[in-house]
Image (cartoon, helix red, strand yellow):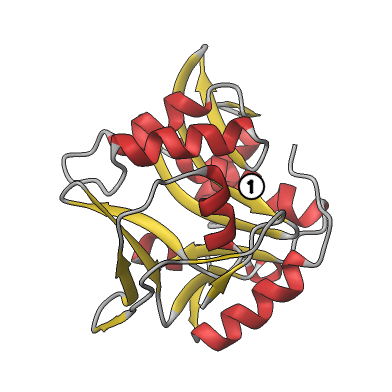
Amino acid sequence: MHLPSPSNPFLFPHLHFTLLHQFGYSLSMQISLTPELLEAAYRQGIFPMADGGEVRWYSPDPRGIIDLESFHLPKRLARTIRREPFEIVINRNFEAVIRACASRQETWISEEIIRAYLALHRSGKAHSVEAYAEGTLAGGLYGVALGGAFMGESMFTAQRDASKVCLAFLVERLKNRGYLLLDTQFITSHLQSFGAVEISRPEYMRRLEKALALDCRFD
């Protein structure tokens, strides 16, 4: 499977995917985790997660997405948003968001992954949405934006509803800027409450190809 980067196409070395019962396609390989590799992987529907210190690459089937036109905003959350309890901003402190997401007892976000996504953020392709309450970071999320696709990576909350408000803000921003795809990778009951669904990997790849052909700006 070829993973074309914008400047020079290359091939993942020793590309042998194993079909896993739970996670779809998975690959482990010894290779530097660079912004160029990350972008090339995302363009082929592949993303990294750390497992016991080892970076593994995934392309799950089925794949979780939130259809931007079918996003469900729960009534209670809509009332919370109307009260405007948070200041919502983008990219003010990307590193604080990714480190907060990594601070759980069990996490797939290793220090190597943090460094790689910080570099991707500096290149303008990884972004954070942040919620502040009285100047303190109360929640947030981060992901990767390419073309008209946004690949959500993780979210955290330190105050009730903060990450949910960030998600609602993200969806509205993507819709307003012409994005076609919001990738959640996997789905949880939490994401399902917002309308997340699973689609087949071939269908995901069709949607991804269409979204990547667009020229949308996140920031």
Other residues around mark 1 within 10 Å, as few (<14) / some (14–19) / many (≥20) = many
- The residue closer to the viewer here, 174 or 44, is 44
Front-most of 155 and 39? 39
Q: Is residue 193 visible?
A: no
Where residue 14 appears, x then y in whole percent? 36, 72
- Check disc 1 and give the amino acid type: Leu
* The quarter of the displayed image where residue 165 is located: top right
Residue tagged 1: 170
**202 w.r.t. 172: above or below:** below
Residue at x 28% of width, y 40% of height = 110
- Residue sitting at 53 percent across and 57 percent down? 74
- Relative to residue 162, is residue 26 depicted above or below? below
Can see residue 115? yes
Report whether 31 appears left or right of 151: left
Residue toward you, 191 or 52: 52
Task: Note whether 29 is above or below 176 in the view shown.
Answer: below
Q: Is residue 169 above or below residue 88?
A: below
Q: Position of residue 17 (x, y in %)?
A: 34, 79
In percent of the image, x 73 and y 65: which residue is there?
Answer: 212
In the rendering, at what x and y percent does residue 148 appear?
Answer: 74, 60
Q: Residue at x 65, y 35 (%)?
A: 123
* Image quadrant containing the C terminus: top right
Which image quarter: residue 126? top right
Of all residues, the one furthest to the top in this rendering is 135
Dividing the picture into quadrants, the one containing residue 130 is: top right
Which structural element holds mark 1? helix
Residue 115 placement, left or right of 174: left
Report x, y in % for residue 38: 51, 52
Q: Is residue 157 left or right of residue 206?
A: left
